């Protein structure tokens, strides 16, 4: 009698717990994906803005070339080259941020750049956090044994995210 | 955008978190967003704002050295459910979701673009976070976390092991800047203090201990103390010869507070700890009063290590007295702090802070996403729930 009662109950609890855990992980994956989508959109906007700045008159040819190349690379890079491309663009924009004269001649463009940099900072920190949360959950024993992650790809953090978090040195 | 706010504390009781939500909600409403606030209320007839939905009477629990009025339980849960399902929010902004409250309830039954703001700074309060493992599955649903200060962020990383974006509390700088001084309070060499002075952590005792030293140099200074309470008890600890320097004003409202700050020569914040942000300091800076504050972490970061106000060693009355004397002696130093303070206060104006928060909302939200109830997405629940809810 005892076993007939306990075994189904235990099975039910186990099923509930597994569904609950799978749900949790699913939500974390979703969070990581949303934050990446937002981050990606902002990176695209930054590249577009960099191109805009590069095409201004007062930019010297060398900077123009550097910036245009970096922006194009960032826009067209596939996922394996993305890291290098975004880091490159960050560096190129950092060089610009030292040029006080240029900044004062295009206040609108540069205030937009400041805005995007600020949003980028938030987007990156949210993405880093979402990825970390999902990954640490996936590493738990129960998720590995029961393969609760299924075929969902492992969320990844890109190296450029760390670089871009650095404050510009002015 | 349609934004839902959840307040953990009773709406009709004054408090920093409620004030923050009220200002933020009003600001967004005035700038073309739709807002709705769900909050407990001890007396529903006292609620003036039409965007507030009362959720029932809260109960009082001690928390973080003060009494918090929070609301929990099945009745509250059904109110929350109703409010969320009828609200169709684009973003749900939960305040202080890590303590047992309406916010935690909302966090556990909602899903989608959830944003949480953490106000508390309680680095040593283990009890409140002992339930962290139980909280984890709920808190991890938040798409974005905001901490109001570095200290609040640290509290969060230590106890809940998650990071947060730091966005400070906002104030309306114009309100304080344009206030008129009250001639009754405007006296030469007046220094002021605001707070529930009966609580030791507010540090009034430190200020009172500093009085003898100040009186030796300035026989005619005046200390104005505002805050709920009688002051008789506090008076007893002061040397009778010094009592005529003190004036207790009792509880003051927002307009009086602005006039009060405008009337002062120096504002003193001798808090010994438990402070997360120190909104009063930003208000004082907006009103153009030079500040002398204890060097607790929240104040140090707010005043940028002493650039925007004088810091004294925490709980050291002698050091407080020397700092006050120095400032009273040098009007040009006070003017310098006033000028820098005004600059600093701009950073905390709602116009700037609300933009930053809106940024976070945008990041928390996928395309065309709405806040849903968890129960809607559980497959088996479709068989059990009734249609009419």
Image: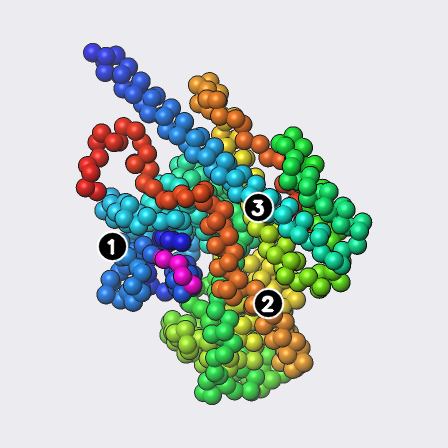
Which residue is denoted by mark 3 in the rendering? Answer: A42
Query: Relative to B205, is A53 on the left or the right?
Result: right
| Residue B72 in view in this figure | no
Name the element at disc 1: loop
Q: In the image, residue B31 lies at what x, y percent?
A: 43, 63
Looking at the image, is mark 2 or mark 1 nearer the viewer?
2
Circle 1 chain: B
Quadrant holding the C terminus of chain B: top left
**Mark 2 to mark 3 CA distance (whole Å):** 29 Å
Q: Which residue is mark 1?
A: B56
Looking at the rendered structure, whether the residues under marks 2 and 3 are on a common chain is answered as no
Q: Which residue is mark 2?
A: B344
Q: Main secondary structure of the magenta part?
A: loop
Residue B135 falls in which quadrant of the image? top left
Magenta part of the chain:
B31-35
Q: Position of residue B208 (x, y in %)?
A: 52, 73
> Going by the image, does B68 lie left or right of A31?
left
Q: Chain of mark 3?
A: A
Mark 2 or mark 3, whichever is nearer to me = 3
Name the residue rendered at 54%, 52% in the picture: B166
Please give left or right for residue A99 compared with residue B262 in the image.
right
Q: Position of residue B312 (x, y in %)?
A: 62, 66
Residue B58 x/y as whole percent = 28, 55
The answer to whether mark 2 and mark 3 are in CB contact below 8 A is no
Q: CA distance from mark 1 to mark 3?
A: 42 Å
Disc 2: CA contacts within 10 A as few (<14), some (14-19) or many (>=20) = some
Rendered view: A125 above or below A107: above
């Amino acid at each position: 009698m005892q076993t007939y009662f306990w075994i189904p109950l235990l099975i039910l609890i186990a099923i509930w717990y597994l569904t609950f855990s799978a749900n949790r992980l699913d939500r974390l994956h979703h969070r990581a994906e949303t934050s990446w989508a937002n981050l990606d959109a902002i990176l695209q906007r930054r590249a577009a803005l960099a191109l805009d700045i590069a095409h201004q008159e007062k930019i010297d040819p060398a900077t123009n070339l550097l910036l245009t190349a970096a922006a194009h690379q960032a826009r067209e890079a596939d996922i394996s080259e993305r890291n290098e491309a975004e880091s490159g663009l960050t560096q190129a924009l950092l060089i610009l941020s030292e040029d006080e004269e240029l900044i004062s001649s295009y206040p609108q463009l540069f205030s937009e750049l400041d805005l995007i940099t600020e949003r980028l900072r938030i987007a990156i920190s949210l993405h880093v956090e979402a990825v970390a949360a999902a990954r640490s959950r996936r590493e738990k024993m129960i998720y590995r044994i029961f393969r609760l992650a299924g075929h969902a790809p492992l969320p990844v953090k890109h190296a450029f995210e760390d670089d871009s978090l650095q404050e510009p040195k002015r | 955008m349609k934004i839902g706010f959840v307040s953990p504390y009773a709406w009709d009781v004054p408090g920093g978190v409620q004030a923050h939500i009220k200002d933020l909600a009003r600001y967004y409403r005035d700038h073309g967003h739709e807002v709705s606030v769900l909050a407990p209320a001890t007396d529903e007839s006292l609620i003036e704002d039409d965007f507030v939905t009362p959720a029932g009477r809260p109960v009082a629990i001690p928390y973080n050295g003060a009494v918090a009025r929070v609301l929990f339980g099945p009745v509250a849960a059904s109110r929350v459910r109703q409010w969320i399902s009828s609200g169709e929010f684009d973003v749900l902004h939960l305040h202080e979701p890590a303590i047992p409250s309406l916010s935690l309830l909302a966090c556990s039954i909602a899903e989608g673009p959830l944003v949480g703001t953490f106000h508390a700074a309680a680095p040593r309060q283990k009890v409140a976070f002992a339930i962290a493992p139980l909280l984890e599955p709920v808190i991890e649903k938040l798409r974005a976390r905001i901490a109001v200060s570095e200290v609040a962020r640290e509290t969060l990383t230590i106890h809940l092991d998650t990071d947060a974006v730091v966005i400070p509390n906002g104030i309306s700088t114009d309100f304080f800047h344009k206030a008129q001084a009250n001639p009754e309070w405007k006296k030469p060499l007046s220094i002021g203090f605001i707070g529930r002075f009966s609580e030791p952590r507010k540090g009034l005792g430190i200020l009172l201990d500093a009085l003898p030293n100040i009186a030796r140099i300035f026989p005619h200074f005046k200390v104005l103390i505002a805050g709920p309470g009688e002051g008789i008890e506090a008076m007893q600890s002061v040397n009778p010869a010094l009592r005529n320097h003190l004036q207790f004003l009792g509880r003051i409202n927002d307009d009086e507070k602005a006039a009060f700050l405008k009337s002062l020569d120096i504002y003193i914040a001798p808090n010994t700890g438990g402070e997360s942000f120190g909104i009063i300091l930003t208000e004082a800076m907006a009103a153009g009063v030079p500040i002398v504050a204890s060097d607790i972490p929240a104040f140090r970061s707010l005043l940028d290590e002493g650039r925007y106000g004088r810091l004294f060693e925490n709980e050291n009355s002698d050091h407080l007295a020397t700092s006050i004397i120095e400032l009273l002696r040098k009007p040009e130093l006070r003017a310098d702090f006033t000028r820098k303070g005004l600059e600093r206060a701009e950073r905390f104006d709602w116009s700037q802070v609300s933009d930053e928060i809106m940024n976070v909302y945008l990041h928390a939200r996928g395309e065309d996403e709405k806040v849903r109830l968890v129960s809607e997405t559980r497959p088996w629940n479709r068989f059990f729930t009734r249609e009419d809810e």
